[in-house]
């Protein structure tokens, strides 16, 4: 069965094509390093503005450019990852509550963090 995580909106199957079960964990939040009004900021990706200046790898060289002037093969540099706030991360790995390693996390053992849950899709 396929699910969408209600916290990070990631989509995943309960098991991979090889049948191995998958425990979803929300990834860290990615922030981009931008210069805005001559100030360096780290902003969520959906808050990058066209008038921000970013550093990209272009033809093998670090290049500063306006977001509005980026080229298709530019690769943004200097992003950082930050942990999600408490309660904003789902972690389906089983809590280490006993020694029964055959128990599935969603059957007999609680998961580590519920986050905002998941929805079958
Ligand atoms: Zn998630």
Image: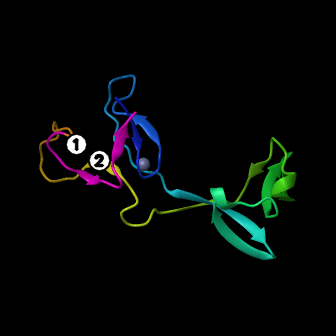
Residue hosting label 1: 105
Taking the spot 43% from the left edge, 51% from the top edge, the residue there is 26
Q: Position of residue 45 (x, y in %)?
A: 64, 57
Residue nearest the observer in this picture, 78 or 65: 65
Residue nearest the observer in this picture, 3 or 13: 3
* Element type at mark 2: strand
Report the quarter where the N terminus lies. top left
Taking the spot 45% from the left edge, 62% from the top edge, the residue there is 84
Q: Could you say which disc has been placed on residue 93 in the image? A: 2
Q: Position of residue 41 (x, y in %)?
A: 69, 71
Magenta segment main secondary structure: loop
Whole-angstrom CA distance, mark 2 to mark 1, is 6 Å
Taking the spot 22% from the left edge, 42% from the top edge, the residue there is 105
Asked if residue 100 is positioned above or below residue 15 in the image, the reply reads: below
Q: Position of residue 91 (x, y in %)?
A: 34, 51
Residue nearest the observer in this picture, 100 or 76: 76
Q: Which residues fall within the magenta stretch?
A: 107-121
- Disc 2 to disc 1: CB gap under 8 Å: yes
Q: Position of residue 75 (x, y in %)?
A: 75, 48
């Amino acid at each position: 069965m396929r699910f969408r995580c209600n916290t990070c909106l990631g989509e995943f199957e309960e098991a991979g094509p090889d049948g191995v079960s998958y425990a979803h964990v929300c990834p860290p939040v990615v922030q981009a390093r931008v210069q805005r009004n001559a100030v360096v900021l780290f902003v969520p990706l959906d808050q990058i503005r066209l008038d921000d200046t970013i550093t990209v790898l272009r033809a093998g060289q670090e290049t500063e450019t306006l977001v509005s002037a980026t080229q298709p093969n530019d690769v943004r540099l200097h992003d950082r990852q930050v942990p999600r706030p408490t309660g904003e991360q789902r972690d389906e790995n089983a809590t280490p509550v006993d020694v029964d390693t055959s128990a599935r996390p969603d059957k007999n053992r609680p998961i580590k963090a519920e986050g905002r849950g998941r929805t079958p899709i």
